[in-house]
Image (tube, rainbow, N blue to C red):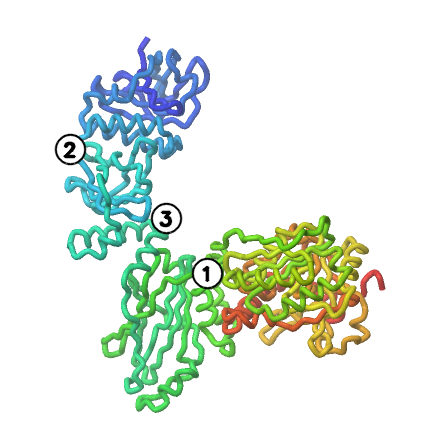
Amino acid sequence: MRSATQVALSPGIVLLVFPADTLGLDLPSVILRAAEGPVMPPLSWQRLATAAGPSLLLIARSQPCLASGANLALSDGRGAALEFLVAPPVALGHIAEGLAPATALGLLRFIASKATGILRHSEDAGLAESCHAAAEAVMAPDRAAIPVALCGPDMVMWALPDSVPATGGIYYALSRRRLRRVTVHGNTVILRDRQFEDGYLLIPDAEGPIHLAPSGGRLPSLAELGRSEDRQSRAFYRSGLAELGRRAPGDPHARRLLRDLQMLAPTAKPHRLTQPGRPFGAALELGLCDHGGGAFFRGWIRDPLGLVCGLTLRSDYGELQLDPTRLGRFSRPDLAETFAGSPFGGLGPKAGFVLHLPEVALRPVAQWSLRLELTTGDSAMLVAPPAILHPQGARDAVLSAVPAAEITPALMEHCIAPAVPPLHAAVLAQRLPPDMLPLGTPLRNPAVSIVVPLYRNMRFLKHQYAALARDPAARAVAELIYVLDSPEQRAEVEHQLRGLHAVHGMPAILIVQSGNFGYASACNSGAEAARSGILLMLNSDVIPAGRGWLQPLLEALAADPGLAAVGPKLLFEDGSLQHAGLYFERGPFGEWYNNHYYKGYPRYYPAAQRACRVPGVTGAALCVRQEAYAAVGGFTTDYVIGDYEDSDLCLKLRAAGGEIAYVPGAELYHFERQSIRAHDGYTRSLAAAYNRQTHHKRWSSTIEALMATMGNQPTLSRQD
């Protein structure tokens, strides 16, 4: 019986070498059978001219029917049939011995292509070691790639030898531990994982494997090559940037490195055309990457005589002609006085523009420029400030790009809103686990956990703490959790809370967020630390109107299992009603706004004295079952800074089958919006308008059906 040579590449992969008389088989129709059982796919065939003569190779995952001593039968669709006995295993080097380097390269590429493809064994260290040893046996000194730069902490760029065609292609890299499929362009290759040093590159149609020479010392960084005066170093730098740019759309590591390199590289000075004595003027004031592959632009164009006939956006990766009708236009009264006396005409009614373009920054862009094409055939160039900013700064810049008085639904929908989600997501992605500082001995079994988010304004902290501590009923059952969303105030707030605890003795917990991530994130962080089955979300500017306010809220939830959340009566500073439940009403452009029942009415207005079912309650004081809160994921964090999270939560609770009620027996003062006024990213931006649109798009149909049922008058509760 004929024998087939077994090559034990690793415990998981086997290679069989069949002798020359199998070459007459029709490979596409070959069927492989074994007496010990079926041969399980995946498997692949390849013809190869070995030292012993022409052979047929089979690679497959290791299995009993391919082990030494097994009987195999090969047949094809034309009726040919051959039988083989699998011989004891030999090393891959035994098969490669005597092969020409180019033939050995073909053998290794076959193994590498299948290992990184259908066999999914690219991390097989035994397989990699076998291939590495075979490549080392046929290595030639003149076929070596030289390391030229370190790209980030774990990537090395090699310069390929001159004998390698600059056209590039699909290569395979192997170290002693793994194999990789890489696409190469030009005369350099970048490999992530420094373990590929002293490995090999398997290039098609070459004279043999290319040795990836070890560095032997410190490598310069790619950024250092960019700063070098040496022409070759600069060429390698450009080649490295080009390769990272090609990888960036699908490789987050390459994208991150390319971003970092561009942030450290020198940028051009921003250039504007602002002289009133010129017949036209313009500026590209913002050109920001949105951290999601798109870019956001803001600027203005003054062209009273119609000289500008085209706009071309430029970056290091090419040019893009802009359609002027896609620009979102708005007035720029801040510039009107500058051009009021120009002999060629003033600013014009809507000189400002904003624009969001998706997928134009799949590769990080360091700086954008805009070329104005003129009717004369001339052009003028505008240069924006650097494009890569911290995501929070970029998000706030987008939300401040258009004055609130100028925003329209179209501007928001097409220009502002598309840029915010990826930036906001990038902000939230930077959140680290918060620190937790206990103050005093906590209650053994709290009935309610009061969560108070803190940001900047600590004006009411001592009053709120004292009011809670001096209420025996609240103190006996409530766990108090403060969540600081402005960590730069940590020392100040910790000092103040320790002093309050020393005076009043009420235990508390201070949770310090790693950054400013907004109201929803702060509340969720407090909820995660809570130990009770009831949560009371309480704003830092809400203070009880008297003792005994907490019991009505807890009693309402205990009396009606169908309630998921309840809210109290909130009062303005002058004693008038601020909140007696939340409902929704249409705004001027048809979007849904949040409003409060009986806002501004007298404190004891009869209708506001009745407990009732309501569409929602405000997050300023929202009492919710912990189980229901967790089931809907808590507050939704994709609203910016703080607004509409409370109604969103109420609508989520309703969608999950819960009801919401107003409890007038609980009265608190709400010194409205004191905390959020300290946030520049909110008070000077379109955050409220963005949140309103987000809320409207998500819940419009639900709200419409809800308001058709409940209307603008609350529904009496079961107790009434």
Give the residue pinned by disc 1.
423
Task: Please tell me which of labels 3 and 2 falls first in the chain.
Answer: 2
Give the percent coordinates (x, y) of residue 389.
39, 63
Q: Quadrant of residue 665?
A: bottom right
Describe residue 631's horizontal placement relative to residue 686 as left or right. right
Q: Taking 446 as reference, is 648 above or below it?
A: below
Q: Quadrant of residue 320?
A: bottom left
> Which quadrant does the C terminus fall into?
bottom right
Disc 3 to disc 1, C-alpha distance? 19 Å
Give the residue pinned by disc 2.
141
Describe residue 542's horizontal placement relative to residue 301 as left or right. right
SS class, disc 3 = helix
Q: Is residue 697 visible?
A: no
Q: Looking at the picture, which amino acid does disc 1 mark?
A: Leu
- How packed is label 1: few (under 14 Cα within 10 Å), some, or many (20 or more)? many
Describe residue 709's horizontal placement relative to residue 207 as left or right. right
